[in-house]
Amino acid sequence: MLPESEKCPDFGDSAEQDPYNRPMMELVSNQESGALPALKHIQVREYVRGLVDGCEPGASAPSERELVQRFGVARMTVRQAMDALVGEGLLVRVPGRGTFVAQPRTQPGKLLSFSQEMTQRGLLPESQTLIARREKAGPGVAKALSLTEGDPVIHWKRLRRADGSPVCVEDAYLNEVLLPGFLQSGMPTSLYEALDARGLRPTWAEDSVSADLATAEEAAHLEVDPGSAVLRVARRALVDDRPIEVSRAVLRGDRYTLWVQFDGSL
């Protein structure tokens, strides 16, 4: 939940306070006599735009049902208005959750932890440790962390939840040389916050994303049927030019939407 100061305005304002609660054809552009009425979906679109202006990313937008009742228009009209705002990047739809204020397009590619991402989506992140131990790096992990095979690494596997529902199984390997005493200090809620406290927060990362089917073990953790659709995200995170983390995450396809921004400039 967002703090009171960061919530959007109440969508249930009274008719006296809300000029948009009047019949649609009474709303005229510039409120001048004789002016032509704006198209219904444009009126809905601009109403929602004004409502969420200044809201924090992750704040809830009004639902289609609320807008249909408020304006007395067809659901298709409301959807057209919301589609336009999603296309602009002002709002983002999260399947099974609703429509929310999107991250500003002026901050593309910001590196976030799972906890930060879920918080920005208006969800409460939780973490359950499945494995936390010191291991010897295998060839793949050693190469990704720029280590020698057999060097010590920290293996931290977690089940990640949002609002109490399982979303992700994350398997991370950390360069132990850079994190002395990490396992002895108690496992943190957020890895990136713990790294930040040591001056080792990743400054950049590279992800690879693929669609796949859940194995029996993954399905049990994620509370889905074996063979259900999942997203697999492999990440290599670095502090400047020093690899600090490599991880593999398996995310429920029905509870997670990957949002990516692209710059169209040449």
Image: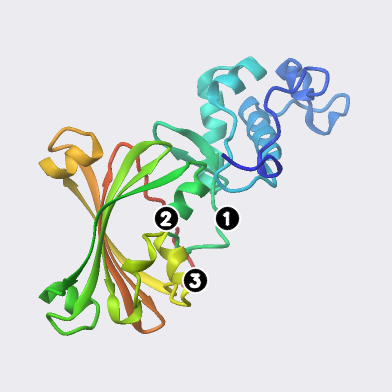
Q: Position of residue 196 (x, y in %)?
A: 48, 71
Q: Which mark is first along the chain, 3 or 1?
A: 1
The crowding category of the residue bearing disc 3, from other C-alpha atoms within 10 Å (few below 14, some 14 to 19, many at least 20), is few
User: Residue 104 got which mark?
Assistant: 1
For discs 1 and 3, the disc positioned in front in the rendered view: 3
Say above or below: 120 vs 77.
Answer: below
Give the farthest residue toward the right: 33
Q: Which mark is residue 197?
A: 3
Secondary structure of the residue carrying numbered label 3? helix
Residue at disc 1, secondary structure: loop
- Identified at 56% across, 41% down, the residue is 85
Residue at 30% over, 36% down: 254
Relative side of 227 to 77, left or right: left
Nearer to the camera, 48 or 188: 188
Marks 1/3: CA–CA distance: 27 Å
Q: What's the residue type where badge 1 is placed?
A: Pro
What amino acid does circle 3 point to? Ala
Assess disc 1: are there few (<14), some (14-19) or many (≥20) residues with their C-alpha within 10 Å of its C-alpha.
few
Residue 81, percent across and down? 57, 32
Q: Residues within 10 Å of mark 2 (few under 14, many from 20)?
A: some
Identity, as a three-letter code, of the amino acid under mark 2: Thr
Kind of element beneath mark 2: loop
Q: Which mark is residue 189?
A: 2
Distance (Cα) linking label 2 and label 3? 13 Å
Position of residue 30 measured from the top left corner of the image (x, y, whole percent): 83, 34
- In this rendering, the count of numbered labels is 3
Does residue 109 appear in this view? no
Q: Is residue 106 above or below residue 118?
A: below
Q: Which mark is residue 174?
A: none
